[in-house]
Amino acid sequence: MTSPEPSWLRGISRLLDYRLSITVGKLLEIGLWLGFAYVIIGVVCLFLRPDGVEILQTRAEEQFGIPPNSIYEVATIAGVLLWPVMMVLPTSPCGG
């Protein structure tokens, strides 16, 4: 008799049941925590410097011809992920 759940769900269940060595598991856990902290810092920096999204929108419009109203979400995510770069960019898109 076969299981009632779909095969993709059984595959995910098998993947989650797979045991890793303690070292690999700890390294993955450390990487996840560091990634989480990086994203939290990016969100805080975005709130401290809200003009960063506008700078990214303006540069995307100038360099790639993308209208700013269609790139807002992408610029927000890029601002969170690229927060170290956003901290050194000039405050206005013109560099002044």
Image (spheres, rainbow, N blue to C red):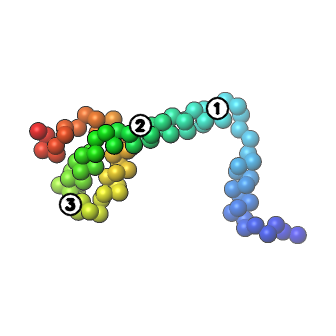
Picture quarter containing residue 25?
top right
- Residue pictured at 79% horizontal, 69% vertical: 4
Residue picked out by circle 2: 41
Question: Do the CB atoms of the residues marked 3 and 2 lie less than 8 Å apart?
Answer: no
Element type at mark 2: helix
Q: Is residue 63 visible?
A: no
Mark 1 or mark 2: name the one nearer the start of the chain.
1
Picture quarter containing residue 46?
top left
Coordinates of residue 30 in the picture (x, y in percent): 57, 32
- Mark 3, mark 2: which one is toward the viewer? 2
Coordinates of residue 96 in the picture (x, y in percent): 11, 39
Callout 2 amino acid: Ile
Question: Going by the picture, which residue comes out furthest to the right?
Answer: 1
Residue picked out by circle 3: 65
Callout 1 amino acid: Lys
Distance between the Cα atoms at labels 3 and 2? 30 Å
Does 90 sit above or below residue 54? Answer: above
Element type at mark 3: loop
Q: Is residue 51 visible?
A: yes
- Residue pictured at 12% horizontal, 44% vertical: 94
Mark 3 or mark 1: name the one nearer the start of the chain.
1
Q: Which mark is residue 26?
A: 1
Coordinates of residue 67 in the picture (x, y in percent): 23, 63
Callout 3 amino acid: Gly
